[in-house]
Amino acid sequence: MNKEFLTGYRVVFTPSLYVIDPASGRVAASHYGGLSLAQLNEFLDGGARDLGARPLAPADSALAQAEEALGHGQLPEAVAAYRRALALGGASWPQREPAMAELAWTLMTSGEHQACADLALAEAPGMNRGPGFARVVLAGLLSANMADTTAWAVAARAKLVPLAREATAITTIARNDRFQLYQELMAGTDLAGDTVATVQWGDRWLAEIERTKPANDDERSALDIARVDAVSMLGTPERAIAPLEASERAMPRNYNACLRLAQVLSDAKRYDEALAACDRGLARVDGPLGRTWLLETKAGAFIGKGDSAQARAVLEEARRSANQIAMASNRDNNLRRIDRLMAEAQK
Amino acid sequence: MKLSTLVLLTALAPSTGHALPTLSNDYARARAEATARHLPLFVDVWAPW
């Protein structure tokens, strides 16, 4: 499903948003990550500006080149063009903060973690406390966390954690960004050995998830995914079991709740229940990505039970499914995860 | 991987108060429709994880 678009535009991140000229297929605007409604309106305005008849100023033209490169998955070219746009636009350029945020996210997605953290350290303190600031800080902290306890990451984290704490209080940021801030604050405080703060951020995140009433199945699934992330990091999988069982009942045709429930049941060492949840999910799933995830989770439960032969058989099935995934980065990540699980199953 | 496309970019005035119609998982149709109507295309690539 959607293979032509995903490969043609070299999609490397989800969610990714695009404004496209349908006649030529040219990308007029692109963005990685979620957006609030206000940010979405700005994004669409930017796309419309690019497609308009008026000639663009040099900085806006460089920004358009960056977004076109990003929209085709050409990350080094996008980074260069964002940097050029920021240099041309200067301090008073209206697009400076959104462009800074896109640069930070592109560096992060490229694996340029130190460059991303450096950018956040240099730019975030002077930015307006709005969505652009939050996204720059989030990308910088996530990048520092990816580098674990290397010296530069430890030093960067010491400055980025307080900025991230500040960012969680900004009311205009997208919920997805705030949830990711909680996640990176948990990871960052954990790496710093501050377990009290890690638990506090996890509890705050879970409380916000529990306060949110989903308007539809997609929102319910998004909240469930966040719930699993939070309890996994807290090491308390039992806390998510009852809400996920409720989601499974509320979405009888959706594999997502089954998958998430299976993950927490497996984490709680309730392997037989996890296997049953995987099988219920496999009966509902309709694409190779979800199928692969369910099979990996099922194999993990068999490994937990000590049944290596069953785990290996399921992993062979998972490998066949993973090879059908259209998005290269997802396909490769899953194949690597399957290799790791296979190595565990052969011990 | 899911794909939602929105053809009527110009209809995005928040004052409409209505959910905007989208086409799901049919880029070819969305592109053809947008081309015929000379409107840009908004694409949201997302996945439920």
Image (spheres, coloured by chain):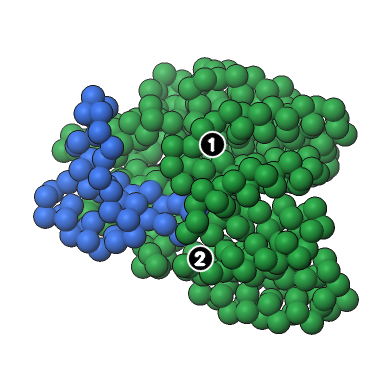
Chain colours: A green, B blue
Residue B7 numbered tag: none
Q: Position of residue A136 (x, y in %)?
A: 57, 32
Vertical comparison of A208 with A249: above or below = above
Q: Quadrant of the C terminus of chain A?
A: bottom right
Q: CA distance from mark 2 to mark 1?
A: 26 Å
Vertical comparison of A29 with A60: above or below = below
N-terminal-most mark, 2 or 1: 1
Mark 2 element type: loop
The residue positioned 44% from the left and 27% from the top of the image is A96
Q: Is residue A254 visible?
A: yes
Give the residue pinned by disc 1.
A176
Mark 2–mark 1 CB contact (< 8 Å) = no
Q: Is residue B20 left or right of residue A258?
A: left
The residue positioned 85% from the left and 32% from the top of the image is A195
Name the amino acid type tagged 1.
Answer: Asn
Q: Residues within 10 Å of mark 1 (few under 14, many from 20)?
A: some
Q: Is residue A89 visible?
A: no
Mark 1 element type: helix
Q: Position of residue A62 (x, y in %)?
A: 37, 39
Quarter of the rendering containing residue A164: top right
Seen from the viewer's position, the closer of residues A69 and A267 is: A267
Vertical comparison of A256 with A180: above or below = below
Name the amino acid type tagged 2.
Answer: Arg
Q: Position of residue A99 (x, y in %)?
A: 45, 33
Give the mark toward the camera: 2 or 1: 2
The residue positioned 72% from the left and 71% from the top of the image is A299
Give the residue pinned by disc 2.
A284
The residue positioned 71% from the left and 82% from the top of the image is A313
Vertical comparison of A282 with A132: above or below = below
